[in-house]
Image: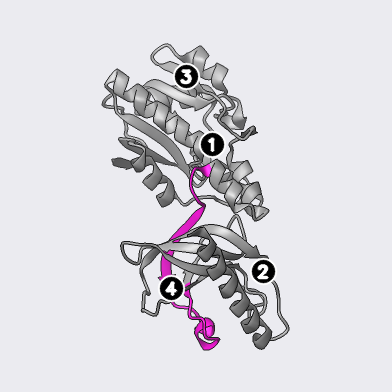
Amino acid sequence: MQLIRGFPDVGTDHVALTIGNFDGVHRGHQAMLTRTVEAADDLGLPAAVLTFSPPPREFFARDAAPPRLSSLRGKIEQFRAFGVARVHVARFNAALASLSAEEFIERILVHKLGVHWILVGDDFRFGRGRSGSLATLRAAAKQFSVEAMHTVGVDGERVSSSAVRNALAAGQLEHAARLLGRSYSISGHVAHGDKRGKSLGFPTANIVLRHKPALSGIFAVRVHGLGAAPRAGVASLGIRPTVKTDGGPLLEVFLFDFNEAIYGRRLTVEFLHKLRDEERYPDLDALTRQIHTDVAQARKYFANQQ
């Protein structure tokens, strides 16, 4: 798969294109990717995706933007898995935000990307002030054809990034997994921490988060990246109120029956079941007793899955 940061000066060939933020790459997004690849095969064109970094909502109102469901790397890995041939990652900045809908079509889609066929959601908005819509695209489509993606539903609910966030925030991991088509996960590199977990008898793999997470609490998890088979464990995702008063969010994972140095390794933590919310305990002894309970409950969860 070809990864392109930004746009070429001039499109050298035609593409079948889909556009979006693709946060979480949920089942609705997956349907778009599948349809784009199918159309590209029918037309003999490369299947291409245009996405943005940072997400537009973070550019306009960073503090009010919703938590990200996936990193840019995570999205790109999903694009590759669905057979996309080319990904354009456009930096969303003031220059891009200032383009009118008509300028975006002519300068970006036609001139720079050489779009021949395009798929967007039926609620797609673009251009300065979100003035462009599906109707705008169709009205301008003299050199390319436009297709709208139908709504994808699960159990009568419209699949959307917002619906996934709501499910995660409510601790409904099984419901989030149905919307995503897979369990929710976070990937990152193991970093050195304050070794507090080790002193309590529960050494953890610490993953520092670059962005506010979409969920918090204590979870039964499965961890990938430490061999051919995933390993079970229990994870804490939050600000650690018992030991920190002003800490940022941190993902700490205690792996069952595992005792190896893995600093620097990239892990994927798959969230399977929420055990409880994060709490503040009066002292470390109380916290340690609760961790023992959490580990026992997580082991019981995995035992019941066999």
Circle 1: residue type: Ala
Q: In the picture shown, does residue 85 fall above or below 211? A: above
Instruction: Report which residue position mark 2 lands on.
Output: 278
Instruction: Report which residue position mark 3 lands on.
Output: 147
Q: Nearer the viewer, mark 4 or mark 2?
A: 2
Q: CA distance from mark 2 to mark 3?
A: 45 Å
Q: CA distance from mark 3 to mark 4?
A: 45 Å
Query: Which quarter of the picture shows residue 214?
Result: bottom right
Q: Which numbered disc flags the more N-terminal residue, 2 or 1?
A: 1
Q: In the picture shown, does residue 181 fall above or below 287? A: above
Residues in magenta, as a range: 180-205
Q: Nearer the viewer, mark 2 or mark 1?
A: 2
Q: Is residue 190 one of those drawn in magenta? A: yes
Q: Alpha-carbon neighbours of circle 4 within 10 Å: few (<14), some, or many (≥20)? A: some
Q: Which numbered disc flags the more N-terminal residue, 4 or 1?
A: 1
Instruction: Report which residue position mark 4 lands on.
Output: 191
Q: Specify whether residue 24 is in view.
A: yes
Q: Alpha-carbon neighbours of circle 2 within 10 Å: few (<14), some, or many (≥20)? A: some
Circle 4: residue type: Ala
Q: CA distance from mark 3 to mark 1?
A: 24 Å
Instruction: Report which residue position mark 1 lands on.
Output: 97
